[in-house]
Image (cartoon, rainbow, N blue to C red):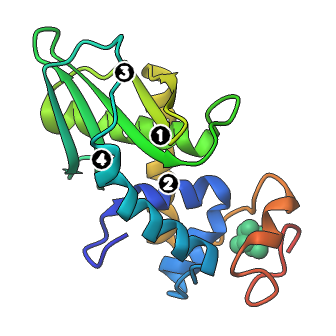
Amino acid sequence: MNRLGVLSIKDVLNYNYCPRIVYFEYVLRIPQRRTVKEDAGLEAHNNFVPRAKRNRMEKRLTYDKKLFNLPLHSPKHNLQTVVDCILIDSKENMAIPMQFKRGKAPSCLYRTMKFQLVAEALLIEECLGFSCPFGLVKFLPEEKTLRTEIGFEQKEELKYQLCKINDVVRSEMYPEGPKTQNFCTDCCYFNKICQGYES
Ligand code: SF4
């Protein structure tokens, strides 16, 4: 969330990790501390996306335009992001968000990666007017691309989550914790201001 209260995809990912992170960060105003590992990952990503531009895109996709690092903002959903890459098929009025990730591709996309693509699809549809039926994550240097379908259900779930995040901030109500206590051990608030799962 920026100083004007506009949410980012990071807020959606945090909420999916544990709703209390949103509470600590925006109600109690205790910022998350990035770990050394996250700092290194962010720096690597920033250096990595320009190199990814030079890689071959999906051969089987039809597109006539590609945009990189495009900022998008939806006042309606109070959400903004910068999309790594958008492949546009003008004839079909279709646009596909593509994220670039470093490292080995998993056997299927993680929930966080899928939600990031759903959020990007929602913003592309609203800001650019294209339909956005699926999204891609390209893992480099392996050059493996994984795809997820983006339908009505996924977009509605994301809109619901955005409402819940805004509710936590506006109501200042302490939300429920994560789905499993395994998430707590990697959380920057653990054993500082939060005792974890059952507290
Ligand atoms: S320690 Fe656990 S319950 Fe507390 S904010 Fe972190 S993930 Fe959520």
What element does badge 3 sit on? loop
| Label 4: few (<14), some (14–19) or many (≥20) C-alpha neighbours in 10 Å | many
**In this rendering, position of residue 181 left or right of residue 132:** right
Q: Residue at x 66, y 57 (%)?
A: 17
Instruction: Report the Cα–Cα distance between label 3 and label 4.
Output: 17 Å
Disc with the residue nearer the chain's start (4 vs 2): 2
User: Which of the two labelled residues, at mark 1 and mark 2, occupies the earlier sequence position?
Assistant: 2
Describe residue 29's horizontal placement relative to residue 47 as left or right. right
Q: Quadrant of residue 99?
A: top left
Compared with 95, 10 (above or below) is: below
**Of tags 1 and 4, which is closer to the observer?**
4
Front one among 108 and 40: 40
User: Which image quadrant for residue 180?
Assistant: bottom right
> Compared with residue 110, is residue 194 higher up or lower down, i.e. above or below?
below
Q: CA distance from mark 4 to mark 2?
A: 15 Å
Question: Where is residue 132, by image quadrant?
Answer: top left
In the picture of the structure, the residue carrying the numbered disc 2 is 12
Task: Return the disc, 1 or 4, that comes first in the chain's sequence.
Answer: 4
Looking at the rendering, in which quadrant would you find the N terminus? bottom left
Determine whether the beta carbon of the residue marked 4 sits less than 8 angstroms from the nearest atom of ligand 1: no
Give the spatial CA distance, label 1 vs label 4: 17 Å
Q: Which mark is residue 158?
A: 1
Q: Is mark 3 within 8 Å of ligand 1?
A: no
The span from disc 1 to disc 2 (Cα, nearest Å) is 8 Å
Disc 2 packing (10 Å; few <14; some 14–19; many ≥20): many
> What kind of residue is marked 4?
Val
Q: Nearer the viewer, mark 2 or mark 3?
A: 3
The residue beneath circle 3 is 58
Which amino acid, by three-letter code, is at mark 3?
Glu
User: Mark 4 sits on what residue?
Assistant: 83
